[in-house]
Amino acid sequence: MSCMKRLCHETRSHDRLRRTLAVCLRLSRRLLLKMSEERDAAALSGSAQTEGEEDLFVSAMESPEAARLSAEDISPSSNGPKAEPMLLDDDPDDLFAEATEEVSLDSPERQPILSDGPSPVITPVTPVMISSRADVFDRSPDQDEDEEENRDTFDIQISVSDPEKVGDGMNAYMVYKVLTKTSLSIFSRDEVCVKRRFSDFLGLHSKLASKYMHMGYIVPPAPEKSIVGMTKVKVGKEDLSSVEFVEKRRSALERYLLRTVKHPALLKDPDVLQFLESSELPRAVSTQALSGAGILRMVNKAADAVNKMTIKMNESDAWFEEKQQQFENLDVQLRKLHASVESLVCHRKELSVNTASFAKSAAMLGNSEDHTALSRALSQLAEVEEKIDQLHQDQACADFYLISELLGDYVRLITAVKGVFDQRMKTWAKCQDAQVMLQRKREAEAKLQHANKPDKLQQAKDEIREWEGKVQQGERDFEQISKNIRREVGRFEKDRVKDFRVVIIKYLESLVHTQQQMIKYWEAFLPEAKAIA
Amino acid sequence: QQEGLDDGPDFLSEEDRGVSFFFPFLISVLFCLCPPTVDDLCFFFCVFFQSTLPNFKQNEFSVVRQHEEFIWLHDSFVENEEYAGYIIPPAPPKPDFDASREKLQKLGEGEGSMTKEEFTKMKQELEAEYLAIFKKTVAMHEVFLCRVAAHPVLRKDLNFHVFLEYNQDLSVRGKNKKEKLEDFFKNVVKSADGVLVAGVKDVDDFFEHEKTFLLEYHNRVKDASAKSDRMIRSHKSAADDINRIASTLYTLGTQDSTDLCKFFLKVSELFEKTRKIEARVAADEDLKLADLLKYYLRESQAAKDLLYRRGRALADYENANKALDKARAKNKDVLQAETTQQVCCQKFEKISESAKQELIDFKTRRVAAFRKNLVELAELELKHAKGNLQLLQSCLGVLKGDT
C-alpha cells in the first residue's frame, strides 16, 4: 500500500508540478496586477474591452478565455483557491482516476476540421460536434482570409525612413518616419505619414502577439533590442558603426512592418491601423524590461519553459509532428547558414580594407620604381586594386543586407512558428486539465450522492455542468487552433519560398555585377602591363 | 589538379632559368616528402642536374640535399671575398608549414562538430594547401640554384660543384647558438655601418642614385609584400566561408519540403564551383604577386648588401689613403702603407666595376620579372572572373526559368 502511495505520488508529480505552477502564476499575476494598476493604468492604450482590466497580460499571450478564467479567480466563487485542497488530496483512489484521464485525440468527440493547408496525413472527416455558441475564434476572419489569398495584388507600400535623433544624453531616442501608401479601403487616407520610435514598434508587436498568437497565428517578430547599439547612438557618437546600426535598424523595422501587413488578419487589426495612421500614439511603457509587464513576461517565459518540459502531448496528427520536426531542422540549418554568411560578410569587409591598403602600398612602390614604364604599370595596378576594394565593400553590403538579414529574420520567424505550435500544446493541456477537473467533479458528486447532502449536491451538479462546458470549449479551441496553424503554416511556407527565391536571385545578380566590373578593370589594366618594356 | 601552381615562381627570365641553350646547365629540384607531423622538419631535396661542360665528371646526376646545405652554399658565397662585387642570389626561405599545421590541428579538434562530408572536404582542402606549399618550397630552392648556375662567375665556384656532385652528406650542420649569435651581431654592426656608409655622399652619380633608390625601394617592397599577403589571406578566408555556405545550402536542399529544395541544391552546386574559382584566384595572386614581391624583397636586400660591401671597400680605401699620407708624413712603414693602399684601391675598383654591371642586370631582371608576372596576373584574373561570370549567369538562367 505504501509503495502504491509512493507510485501514486510520482505519477501525479508531473501534473501536480504543472498545477502548482499555474497556481503560483495566478497569485503572482494578481499581485502584479494590483501593483501596476496604480502605476500604468493611464499609460496603457485602449485594446479590446475584454482585456481592459487585464492590460498587464498583454505581453503574457493570454487568450480571452484565460482572461475569463482569471476573472473567475478574482470573483469570490472561483475554483482557484478551491483547487488547492484537491491537489493535496492523497486519496489512493486517485491513482485509478488518473489512469482514466488519458484522453487521446482520437476520441470520437473530436474530429479535426480540415483546413486548406498542405494535405495532412489523416483522412478528412466531417465535424460531428458543432458548437452553437458564438466564439471569438470562429469569426469571419476565416472567410476574409480565403478571399485575401485569392487576390493577387497586395496594394500597400510602407517605407520607414529619415531617422532623426530626439533629445540628448541617455534619454535620447531615434524617431523614424513611417510612410504608408495604399488604396485599400480600411485605411482612411491614400497616403499617411507618421513618426514612430522603436518602442512603438515593440509595443505594436506585443499587442498583436497577445491577441493572435494563442489562436495559432504566426505574428512576425519585431527587431531585437540592442543596448550597446542604442547607447552609442544616444551618447552621440557619429561614427561609422552607429550610422550602420541606425541603418540596420531602419531596414529591419521596414521589413517588420511589411511582413506584418502581409498577414491578412493583422492588416485589418485596429492596433495596426492605429500604428500606421494616427499621429499620436500613447507610449508603450510595457515594453521596458524593468516594468511590471516586463517582469511578468519573464515569469511567463519561465513558466512556459517548464510547461514545455512537463507537457507530454499525445500527438495523433502526424502532420503536426512532421511539421514540427521540419521546422526544427530548418531552424538548425538556417542558424548555421546565418553564422557562415555573417563570417563571409566579415571576411569580405576585411578583404576590402586589406585590398585598399595594398593599393596604397603598390602606389608607393610605383613611385619609387625608377623604370618609367614599370612605375606607370604599378600605379595602374594600385588604381585597379583600389576600385576592386570598393567592389568588395559593395559586395559585402549586398551579402549583408540581402542574405544575412533575411536569414536573421527567418530564424526569428521560425521561433514564432515554434511558439505557435507550443500554443497548441498549451491549449491541449488546458483541455486535458478541464477534463481532469470534470472527472473530479463527477466523482465528488457521486460521493455526495452517497453522503446525502442535498444542498451541496446541487452545487456539485452545477459545477459539473460548468466543467462540461469548459471541456467542450477546450476541445473547440483545440480544433480551431489546429486549423489555424495548418493555414498559417501553409501561408508561411508560400511566403518563405517566395522570399528566398527573390532574395537569392537578387544576390546572384549582385555577384554577376561584381564579376562584370572585375573583368572591366582587369581588361583595362592588361595593356598597361604588356606595355612595360 | 591545380593549374596555376604548376608554373612555379617565375622571377627569372627565360635565360636565367637555364632552359635556353646558352647555358649548359639544367637543374631541377625534385622532392621527397617528409611526414608533416615531425616537429623538426627535415626536407630532402633531390637535385637533378644535367651539364655539357667538361668541368663535371658526369653529364647528368642527382644528389640529395637538405635545406641547411643550401644555406651553407649561400653563406659560403657571401663570406667569399672574391664575390664581394656580385649580387649573391638570395637564399631560399626555410620551409614553413606552421600555418598549415595549425589548421590541421584545428581541423582535428573540430572533427566532432561537422558532418562527415564537410570534414572530408576540409581535409582535402588542407592537403591541397600542403601540396601547394611543398611545390613552392621546391621552386624556391630550384630558383636559387638556377640563379647561381646562370651567373658567369658563381657557376664556376668549387663549393657549387661539390654541392652538385658530391653524393655523400656534406656534413654541414646548421649554425649552433654561438654562431647564430655571431651572425646576429654581425648584422647589427652591418646595419649601423650601413647607415654610416649610406650617409656619405658618393662621388659616383650612378651609385649615389642606386643607393637612394634601393633603400627606398626595399622598404616599399617589404610593405607591399606584407600587405599583399594579408589581402590574399582574407581572400582565402572568404573562399572558406563560401565553402561552408555551399555545404549548409546542400543540407537545406535535401531537407526542404517545398519547391525551394531544388533551388537550394542548384545554388549550393553553384557556390561549390565559384568557391573553387575564388580559391584559385587567391592562389594565383599568391604566386604571381605575393611571391614576386617576396622574391624582390630578398633580391633588393642582396643588392643593398652589395652596395654595403662596396661602401666598406671605399671606406677601407679612404682609410688606406689617409694611412699612406700619415706614413709618408712620418716617413715610417711607407712601403707597407703603399701596398695596403694599392690592394684597397684594386679591391674597390674591382667591386665597383662588377657592382655596376650587377645593378644594371638587376634592374633588367626586375623589370622583366614584373612585366611577366603582372601580365600573367591580369590574364589569370580575367580568366577566373570570366569563368565565375559564366557559372553565375547560367545558374541564374536556370533559376529564373524555373519560376
Image (cartoon, coloured by chain):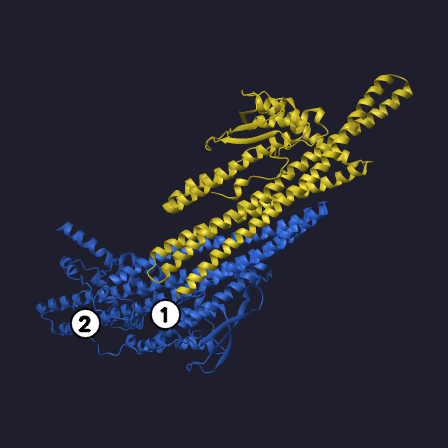
Chain colours: A blue, B yellow
Given the image, on which type of amino acid does mark 2 rest? Glu
Given the image, on which type of amino acid does mark 1 rest? Ser
Q: Position of residue B297 (x, y in %)?
A: 65, 39
Graded by Cα atoms within 10 Å as few (under 14), some (14 to 19) or many (20 or more), the crowding at tag 2 reads some
Q: Label 1, on which residue? A: A210
Q: Is residue A133 left or right of residue A395?
A: left
* Res B252 → quadrant: bottom left
Q: Residue at x 49, y 62 (%)?
A: A509
Decide if residue A54 is in sight here.
Answer: yes
Residue B91 vertical position relative to residue A117 in the rendered view, above or below: above
Front position in the image: A201 or A77:
A201
Front position in the image: A165 or A244:
A244
Q: Is residue A159 left or right of residue B327?
A: left
State the SS at label 2. helix
Front position in the image: A446 or B172:
B172
**Quadrant where the image shows the C terminus of chain B:** bottom left
Q: Chain of mark 2?
A: A
Front position in the image: A87 or B343:
B343
Q: Position of residue B335 (x, y in %)?
A: 86, 17
CA distance for labels 1 and 2: 27 Å
Q: Position of residue A162 (x, y in %)?
A: 55, 70
Q: Is residue A274 left or right of residue A112?
A: right
Decide if residue B180 is in sight here.
Answer: no
Label 1 or label 2, whichever lies nearer to me, is 1
* Res A111 → quadrant: bottom left
Give the numbered dot on residue A468. 2
Q: Position of residue A91 (x, y in %)?
A: 15, 58
Q: Is residue A468 left or right of residue A299?
A: left
State the SS at label 1. helix
Residue A105 vertical position relative to residue A190 in the rendered view, above or below: above
Graded by Cα atoms within 10 Å as few (under 14), some (14 to 19) or many (20 or more), the crowding at tag 1 reads some
